Image (cartoon, rainbow, N blue to C red):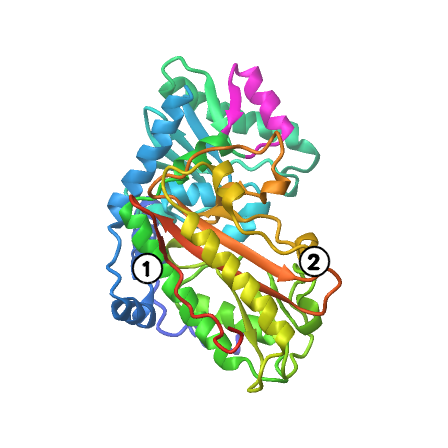
Amino acid sequence: MDSAAPRGSFGRHRKIMPFEPGSVDALRDASRRKAASLNQHVLGYGAQAEAEWAAAGIAAPDLPAMRRYRLDRIRAELKRRDYAGALLYDPVNIRYATDSTNMQPWVAHNRTRHCFVATEGPVVLFDYFSCEHLSDHVGVVDEVRPAVSWIYLYSGELTELKVRRWAAGIADLVTEHGGGNRRIAVDHINPEGVGELARHGIAIGNGEAVMENARLIKSPDEILAMRRAIVACEAAMGEMEQALKPGISENELWAQLHRGNIARGGEWIETRLLSSGPRTNPWFQECSSRVIEDGDLVAFDTDLIGPYGFCADLSRTWLCGDGKPSNEQRGLFRIAADQIAHNTQLIRPGISFRDLVERSAVPPGDCFPARYGVLYHGVGLADEYPTLPHAGDWTDDTPDGVLEPGMVLCAESYIGRLGGQEGVKIEEQILITGTGNEKLSAYPLDQRLL
């Protein structure tokens, strides 16, 4: 049969390596090496981000040292709680343990990729099909195995069969590297997995507690990476502010932050918290097609996962247009700015969570019912422990603790009158130092509103 297409025309400059019996392993190895050398984390963040970090005077973090520090933190916490290892499904926890990524939002809701960190033994990453190259650059993953996923998407009504195969592999690791300890920490797991591991004599504990405590204290290299993520976020915020003109929609404005984050090697944004005018009160409207008008307040919360996987969680409120703000807009903004300033100066090592919130400024009476849900929360690769409510919201099941150097908190304020027209959101990212604190976020407040 005659073909209209010339032979070999399907792929410009295509070179076909010889494929013969016995060559499969060699081709796989060559393909893996090529892919690993072109991994996004190997290629880096690009000229734009690097130039902005150089201008800000922020040195590059020592990533091998950061990765070793994180594994040491995890293993110290596992030893303290007497676990043989940790089984991690949360992609943020896997990033912390391995500094590797793969379809992060997708695997957050499709429990496929997972990782086993032995307290005394290897780090074994169970990754998606043919994805070994995604962790070859990190130097802390000892072995990559194909993930056995027993989510319904893959297993259907045969979940019971698939979970048996999955559990057998985990049990083998615990037997080989647990030293007789049959207790492991797991961050997320469905009931079928709990039951099948129990059948192998494996008891499960709270992996979230292990990982949140491991992630609590940041190393100097993690702080450098976080500083760089914040610089990238604030550069994207500057592009947003330049784009803020009457007639732009909330969605179009929000897209500027996404574009700026991705252009600088950032990863994703966790929420859609941008609103304008009457949609700023109450808070927590997700951004919409509403067209922003001259004189509107525009408030947003970045919730941005940027370069190095670090969160830049900043909030600002801007006035749209070239006019003057109203007295009400200025009044709301001043209350929020003063609350943030007062509460930030309270942050220091050695103060207890309870003492901090008891001393904190809170919204006035007509704004208190519409208050933000927390005064402070931890931040690192995402929002992290602890979360500190207003003193009036403290209950018997609110955990207390003490601030330590190396922790990073976000100080939050939302000020809007109950039933009012508009509201103001401000949030700053604060490093706890040996003697006090340092504000890591630097994007200026809208001076017209001050």
Amino acid type, residue under disc 2 in the picture: Asp
Q: Total of numbered circles in the picture? A: 2
For the residue pair 197 and 132, the one nearer the viewer reads as: 197
For the residue pair 376 and 253, the one nearer the viewer reads as: 376
Crowd rating for badge 2 (residues with CA inside 10 Å; few <14, some 14–19, many 20+): some
Whole-percent x and y of residue 207?
49, 31
Q: Which residue is mark 2?
A: 366
- Disc 2 and disc 1 in contact, CB within 8 angstroms: no
Residue 12 colored magenta?
no
Q: Find the magenta span and give its range.
A: 188-206
Judged left or right of residue 120, residue 284 is: right
Whole-percent x and y of residue 54?
25, 68
For the residue pair 419 and 407, the one nearer the viewer reads as: 419
Residue 160 makes an appearance in the image: yes
Crowd rating for badge 1 (residues with CA inside 10 Å; few <14, some 14–19, many 20+): some
| Quarter location, residue 48 | bottom left
Whole-percent x and y of residue 19?
35, 53
Where 266 falls versus 48 (above or below)? above
Disc 2 to disc 1, C-alpha distance: 56 Å
| Quarter location, residue 178 | top left
Closer to viewer: mark 2 or mark 1: 2
Residue 195 colored magenta?
yes
Judged left or right of residue 182, residue 141 is: left
Q: Earlier in the sequence, mark 2 or mark 1?
A: 1
Q: Which residue is mark 1?
A: 38
- Asked which secondary structure carries label 1, the reply is loop
Q: Residue at x 33, y 36 (%)?
A: 71
For the residue pair 56 and 173, the one nearer the viewer reads as: 56
Q: Quadrant of the N terminus?
A: bottom right
Amino acid type, residue under disc 1 in the picture: Leu
Whole-percent x and y of residue 22?
32, 44
